[in-house]
Amino acid sequence: MAKNKYVYLFGNKKADGDGSMKPLLGGKGANLAEMTRIGLPVPPGFTITTEVCTYYYANKRSYPKELQAQMEAGMANMEKIMGTKFGDKAAMPLLVSVRSGARDSMPGMMDTILNLGLNDQTVLSLVAATKNERFAWDCYRRFIQMYGDVVMGVQKREGEDHEPFEVVIEGFKHEKYHGDIEDSKLTAEDQQELVKRFKALVKERTGKAFPNDPWDQLRGAAGAVFGSWMNDRAIVYRRKYNIPSEWGTAVNVQAMVYGNTGDTSGSGVAFTRNPANGTNEFYGEFLINAQGEDVVAGVRTPEPVAKLKAAMPQAFAELMKVRSILEKHFKDVQDVEFTIQEGKLFMLQTRNGKRTAMAALKFSMDMVKEKLIDWETAVMRNPADQLDQLLAPVFDLAEVKKAKAIATGLPAGPGAACGKLYLNADRAVVAAEKGEKVLLVRNETSPEDLRGMIAAEGILTAKGGVSSHAALVARQMGKVCVCGASALEIDYTAKTVTASGQTFAEGDFLSIDGTSGIVYGGQIKTAPSEIITGLLQGDKAAQGTEKFKSFLQLMKWCSQATRLAVRTNADNPEQTETALAFGATGIGLTRTEHMFFEGDRIDAMREMILAENVEDRKKALAKLLPYQREDFTGIFKALKGFPATIRFLDPPLHEFVPHEAQAQADLGAKLGVSAEKIAKRVNQLHEFNPMLGHRGCRLGIAYPEITEMQARAVFEAAADVQKAGIKVKPEVMIPLVGFKKELDLQVEIVHRVAKQVMAEKKVKLSYMVGTMIEVPRGALTADEIAQTAEFFSFGTNDLTQMALGISRDDMGSFLGAYTENEIFKKNPFATLDQTGVGQLMQIAAQKGNATRPGIKLGICGEHGGDPDSVKFCHKIGLNYVSCSPYRVPVARLAAAQAAIADKKAAAAKPAKKK
């Protein structure tokens, strides 16, 4: 046997490979081997491994020296099984198809060649052997077209609207038939004439004659498949689905079977169950007298596969048997390609079918009932990153078809929303109060827009990314959101939005799809998800639906499997109740600053900021105290004994003051202060880099009275709720700590105020004080900080900004270039950078545990709702993740999947010898 095996054979119920060998044989090659092994009717062939693709790119597009002899052995095996010879000029020739097959299915990304081995001599052998002249010349014409396009690069040039081969066909049809006719109506003589014209086109475009030698054709085709691994479509697809370029693709060379020999032949593609809604029905399409590429190319309209039963009952019955065998063997829904040659069925491919979130849920539930899979496998089968599709409102599909897209942005909050556009938060609130459905449209949003965001059905921004303010808040609120739709031109003065040549004024309707990122002009109808209405509104009809019951069952299984708790980021009782309905076990982050933007509170907050001495500051803070206490009381009551991590004031003070002259004058009139004084104070608060400026614990150290007021509000609320017979578990979190001394100063105030309140209220409270690890120095000195901190919560939004030295709000200008050049595999503000930021988290966890064994560890950045990040948090031993209320089910599913994967990996490890 060759030292380096580059070619794996399959055929006649035997195969060198099997279904477990996807990294080496690609998905298609591994499954062809597996189908052959289980006795399905698979035409024989061989697979050239992914290692040859890697070699090809590493060695100036050349092949290993052993490859040719191994390919010849593979061809000899095929010839023996088929009883035909490759390149035979005297009898029926063996023709082959050449298809790519990457490790992960990449539908439509790579190019296929059929009927390889035909030339001016072998086409005559095919005519003689089949006694079907039209069929033989049709095969040859198709081969020249595919090979000319894929291998020789005869494709449309810049400025050309149509593929050059199609131009030749259309020209011929008009010349001979004075109009368009179906390809199947072309005669043998027509096909012969097209072969001549196609060859002339190849010569004209490339300067080379079409290759006649079958082995030259085969080597060229294999090279083209490897070349197509780096074509634009393949690169875009890999980037979208995070498929590494170093994986490479395999090449599958397989004996041709023909669906185009007449009316007893055909080709089709099908799913063993419906991949859109999960119904247990054979679902797909087929064409009579056609090759497989015709079905997917859209040249002819295929028939639903159910109609095959009437057209070819015997072949259909055999296909139903194969469907059952495949599902029982692979224990998953399969996407298959088949050809029927003169009544005989052949299977050309099977792979796990792509599916919607709805179909994935139904497949997994049904297969557990059918005892095909267990509940743990069912949990693993539901992609966590698709789960929020089940919760999102949706557009009516028929309406979408009629609508016109005007812009595309980043899908930042899934679902569908339609409303009148407003460019200002206050005007949006006024319109919403009148009962209007509203979309808030801004260049970008800030905390000041919060009221407008709450009032809006959806949020649309021209700038910002998936972790911008708009996106974060939208996810927390479960709002539909499209960010960074750069085609939008927003004119705040004229109150207009222009896109795709259309101008929309305030009050005009727009519709946004937060699942796809598409923006439409006008109104499109939406419908809420049954899961939302069932869980949050107690809708009995929704609770009776299969979708609702299946979702609840999936969440129950997640609870059985998981080790990692899931909390929520919530700032009020409503958000808290939503998260608890979704299965959260507490709050991992309450942002107290959001509470200051409500109604009259902002005025008291601004009064505090404008105060020139401690006494005046304390007076203003005394006005804020009852508001904060009321907020915390509501949250503690809603939690019913679950813990609440409350972050003290974090943003810089400039975010709370007005920056426009008119707004400053209005504030001055309210507070009895001159507009000049306000403008001067606003100017004093200006910072060159506020993200690294006077914020977080630095505010509490400069103005300890702020920390005192917030601590008092927390403990007074906790005492009142506990006295009412409801358990409370407050966890006070000091933000932005990089030095132990910073934390010590703040914790001393918290403990002092807690002691005072417990004495005043005559109650004993159990509480914790910890810190947010978001400054790299905090992570690196976590052993010192843990002497004081009782818990750590990783604020990964800021930790990522500081570790990478990248502002999340300014990265849009280079994110594209960084992704294209594979500097980022994923946006580090959406998915944790496990190598860099993750290492800081691991250091902090290890050092924290060394000082304080069993220290509680959590994460409260937006990464807490990202499946890959949740799995990393499980791996490094965190106790909980915290995310927006509507991301709680996603995090629960990801946490359960991490635990199940761990369990399976441990079971697969060989037991240690004693």
Image (spheres, rainbow, N blue to C red):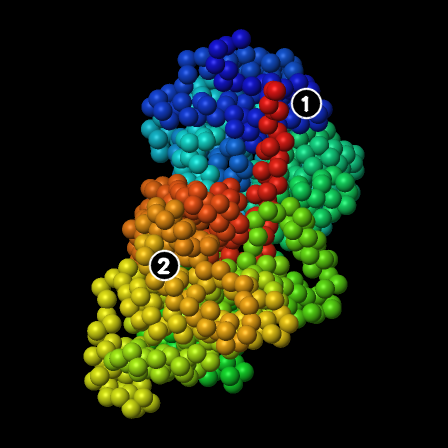
Q: Residues within 10 Å of mark 2 (few under 14, many from 20)?
A: many
Q: Label 1, secondary structure: give it.
A: helix
- Label 1 or label 2, whichever lies nearer to me, is 2
Using the rendered view, name the quadrant where residue 33 is placed. Answer: top right
Q: Residue at x 62, y 70 (%)?
A: 726
Residue under label 1: 37
Using the rendered view, name the quadrant where residue 308 is placed. Answer: top right
Q: Residue at x 72, y 24 (%)?
A: 39
Evaluate whether residue 276 shows in this view.
no
- Residue 696 is situated, as x and y percent measured from the top left of the image, at 34, 63
Q: Residue at x 57, y 26 (%)?
A: 21
Whichever of labels 1 and 2 marks the residue nearer the N terminus, that label is 1
The mark found on residue 743 in the picture is: 2
Amino acid type of the residue that numbered disc 2 sits on in the rendered structure: Leu
Left or right of 87 in this view: 235:
left
Residue in the foreground of this view, choosing between 563 and 782: 782
Q: Is residue 410 above or below residue 324?
A: below
Residue in the foreground of this view, choosing between 170 and 359: 359
Q: Residues within 10 Å of mark 1 (few under 14, many from 20)?
A: many
The C terminus, quarter of image: top right
Amino acid type of the residue that numbered disc 1 sits on in the rendered structure: Arg
Q: Label 2, secondary structure: give it.
A: helix
- Residue 360 is situated, as x and y percent measured from the top left of the image, at 64, 48
Q: Is residue 492 above or below residue 77?
A: below
